[in-house]
Image (spheres, rainbow, N blue to C red):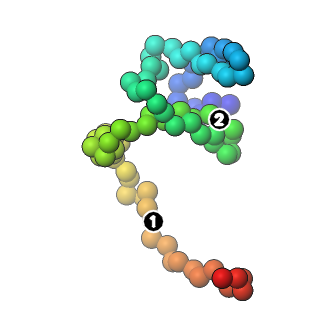
């Protein structure tokens, strides 16, 4: 079931020679030659992420999508029990 915070549209999947090609609608076109692919462990959804080419792009992205104050929270670090292994 799609996340209600995001608009879902259909894309065509073509299988050829053991690989798959996904035809993205024009509104989802990417301006890069490479991207990262991962699977969300809780939903199994495939996630495509643009591969940033430089630190400048990374910082620009951080400026566009600022992190909220609760992104990092203070917590008490606890020591893990000693398993006897080195």
Q: Relative to 26, is 42 above or below? A: below
For the point 46% across and 30% down, which residue is it?
Answer: 34
Q: Considering depth in this image, is 77 or 34 the residue closer to the camera?
A: 34
Packing grade of label 1 (10 A; few <14, some 14-19, many >=20) is few
Q: Which residue is mark 1?
A: 73
Packing grade of label 2 (10 A; few <14, some 14-19, many >=20) is few
Q: Secondary structure at mark 2?
A: loop
Q: Which residue is mark 2?
A: 45
Q: Secondary structure at mark 1?
A: loop
For the point 51% across and 77% down, which residue is it?
Answer: 76
Residue 74 x %, y % = 45, 70
Residue 41 x %, y % = 67, 45
Determine whether, in the image, residue 47 is placed left or right of residue 69.
Answer: right
Q: CA distance from mark 1 to mark 2?
A: 27 Å
Q: Nearer the viewer, mark 1 or mark 2?
A: 2
Residue 29 x %, y % = 45, 19
Q: Is residue 46 visible?
A: yes
As drawn, the label of residue 18 is none
Q: Relative to 62, is 72 above or below? A: below
Choose top left, top right, bottom left or bottom right for residue 11: top right
For the point 37% across and 57% down, which residue is it?
Answer: 69
């Amino acid at each position: 079931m799609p996340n209600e915070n995001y608009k879902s549209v259909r894309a065509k999947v073509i299988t050829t020679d053991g690989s798959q090609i996904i035809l993205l609608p024009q509104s989802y076109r990417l301006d890069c030659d490479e991207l990262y692919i991962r699977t969300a462990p809780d939903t199994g959804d495939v996630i495509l992420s643009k591969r940033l080419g430089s630190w400048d792009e990374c910082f620009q992205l951080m400026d566009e999508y600022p992190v909220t104050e609760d992104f990092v929270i203070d917590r008490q670090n606890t020591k893990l029990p000693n398993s006897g292994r080195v």
